[in-house]
Image: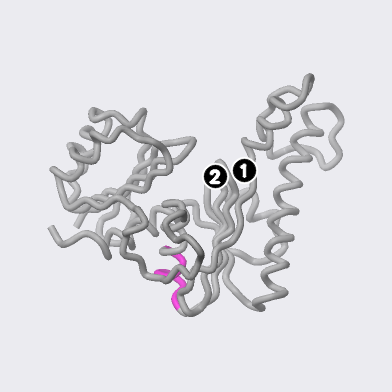
Amino acid sequence: MITLCLDFGNTRLKAAIFDHDNMVAENYLDDDSVGSVEKLLQQYHPQKIILSSVINHNPAIEDVLAAHAPFHKLSAATRINFTTPVGKPETIGADRLALVAAAVHFFSGHNNLVIGLGSCITYNFVNQYHQFLGGGISPGMDMRFRAMHEFTAKLPLVAADWNFPLIGYDTKTNMQSGVLNGMASEIDGVIEKYADKYGNFNVVLTGGNSAYFASQLKKEIFADHNFLFKGLYALSELNNCPA
């Protein structure tokens, strides 16, 4: 059984292919056009499809996907493997739903803090009773670099360099040290606050730069770049009828 999982984020449009519960391929889409989607369908011929989107994507692609195979789009109506005792569950982002679903699927019966490193950093806490309690959102790495550039007169736009010095020796390295060390310290601090309240729990770090930040943190964590895709697969199994 081939499942196509689509993740349309603020920065990139990505797709993962699962053969049963094993992820076998990952692709990047050039855009959200019908042609880009049809190319994936012709290449992999999926029997199930799921879409997580946090952007205003081209609505025509949903008809194309639904015509090919059982299709589900994440929304407030999605059937999930956890409860959401929060004020407005319909406001929970599709990406956060997928991350929590993966935590419940792979670490059932445990408290889990899933930290997603994307355009924003999201902190997502689901307890051992499979209740998603919420968490927090803060600016991501690229957003921090852009903010310093756009809201000042002279600071340049710089990119991450993982060989940055602790003590910056020029404007560029000062900004890199501030952003990257600042993010690592923030994540450590948030984990410590959760530990004070909940004791032992799993920490999962995911997103494009998770491997780097995992090596900088004090607490032992699980780093899984594909954790969101695994959550989408789990939700597809719950919401898509067999082909």
Which region of the structure is painted magenta? 102-108
Residue 243: x %, y % from top left: 12, 57
Residue 98: percent from the left, percent from the top?
41, 57
Residue drawn at the location 29% of the way across and 54% of the way down? 18
Q: Residues within 10 Å of mark 2 (few under 14, many from 20)?
A: many
List the residue tagged with mark 1: 140
Given the image, on which type of amino acid does mark 1 rest?
Answer: Gly
Q: CA distance from mark 2 to mark 1?
A: 6 Å
Element on which disc 1 rests: loop
Helix, strand or loop status at disc 2: loop
Residue 222 shows up from this direction? no
- Identify which residue, 73 or 15, lies in the foreground: 73
At horizontal 66% and vertical 30% (from top left) the residue drawn is: 146
Quarter of the figure with residue 143: top right
Q: Which residue is mark 2?
A: 118
Left or right, 6 with respect to 223, comes to left
Label 2 close to label 1 by CB (< 8 Å): yes
Please tell me whether residue 84 belongs to the stretch shown in magenta.
Answer: no
In the displayed structure, 120 sits above or below 193; it is above
The one nearer the camera, 215 or 123, is 123
Which residue of the protein is positioned furthest toward the front in this rendering? 87
